[in-house]
């Protein structure tokens, strides 16, 4: 128990405490420990509500404690799934990822579908233009005039793993060749 707790609960050495008051003190101490663990976990990186909940469950806190900690974190804006999704998408878009992959990754992180749809819907990126930029970085040689079937398949597979649909990849490849010829 910290000196702060001793002061808050007005504890004195040798004083008697009834059981209910002792249980209240213990419950508050557990709550404080859970909050401290959560804040320490957040100090490394931003987290979603679901990620935080999973982490706290590994410490076997009661559901009531989990709910209180998550509520505290949301109220004080330590966790905000909408803000997290916006920052995550902006970061990954710069790295050359498409909407499909972003949607999947955000869903795996526990972001709700309506938030995902809103964040991805607000993107102003042209997928074909993004594909063209990726191809310009990936294809170093200016001597290539056309892709053979194996190369095409590799490029479509690569773009698919990056989260671009077949139509987006096709439009981006077409744009790439239009600018080169």
Image (cartoon, grey):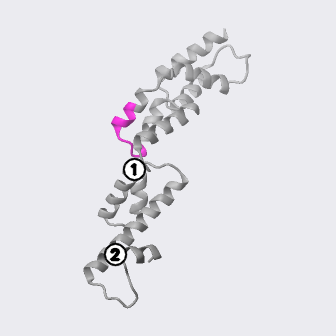
Q: Nearer the viewer, residue 153 or 61?
A: 61
**Which residue was labeled with disc 2?**
25
Kindly report which numbered mark, 1 or 2, lies closer to the viewer in this rendering: 2
Q: Main secondary structure of the magenta part?
A: helix
In the image, residue 86 above or below residue 121? below
In the image, residue 109 above or below residue 158? below
Q: Nearer the viewer, residue 43 or 156?
A: 43
Residue located 44% across and 40% down the image: 83
What is the secondary structure assignment of the residue under circle 2?
helix
The residues colored magenta run 108-118
What is the secondary structure assignment of the residue under circle 1?
helix
Query: Is residue 78 found inside the magenta-colored segment of the image?
Result: no
* Left or right placement of residue 58 versus residue 144 in this view: left
**Which residue was labeled with disc 1?**
49
Residue located 25% across and 79% down the image: 20
Query: Is residue 111 found inside the magenta-colored segment of the image?
Result: yes
Residue 157 x %, y %: 54, 30
Residue 61 x %, y %: 36, 66
Distance between mark 1 and mark 2 Cα atoms: 27 Å
Residue 93 x %, y %: 54, 31
The local crowd at label 2, few if under 14, some if 14 to 19, many if 20 or more residues have their Cα within 10 Å, is some
* Left or right placement of residue 180 versus residue 9 in this view: right
Q: Is residue 166 visible?
A: yes
Residue 94 x %, y %: 57, 31
């Amino acid at each position: 128990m910290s000196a702060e707790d001793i002061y808050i609960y007005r504890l004195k050495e040798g004083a008697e405490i009834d059981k209910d008051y002792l249980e209240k003190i213990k419950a508050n101490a557990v709550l404080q420990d859970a909050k401290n663990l959560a804040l320490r976990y957040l100090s490394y990186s931003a987290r979603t509500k679901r990620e935080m909940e999973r982490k706290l469950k590994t410490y076997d806190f009661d559901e009531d404690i989990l709910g209180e900690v998550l509520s505290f974190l949301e109220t004080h804006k330590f966790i905000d799934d909408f803000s997290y999704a916006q920052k995550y998408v902006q970061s990954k878009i710069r790295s050359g990822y498409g909407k499909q992959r972003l949607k999947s990754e955000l869903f795996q992180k526990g972001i709700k579908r309506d938030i995902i749809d809103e964040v991805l819907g607000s993107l102003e990126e042209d997928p074909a233009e993004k594909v063209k930029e990726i191809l310009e970085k990936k294809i170093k040689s200016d001597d290539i005039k056309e892709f053979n079937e194996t190369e095409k398949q590799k490029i479509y597979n690569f773009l698919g793993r990056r989260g671009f649909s077949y139509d987006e990849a096709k439009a981006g490849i077409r744009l790439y060749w239009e600018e080169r010829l």
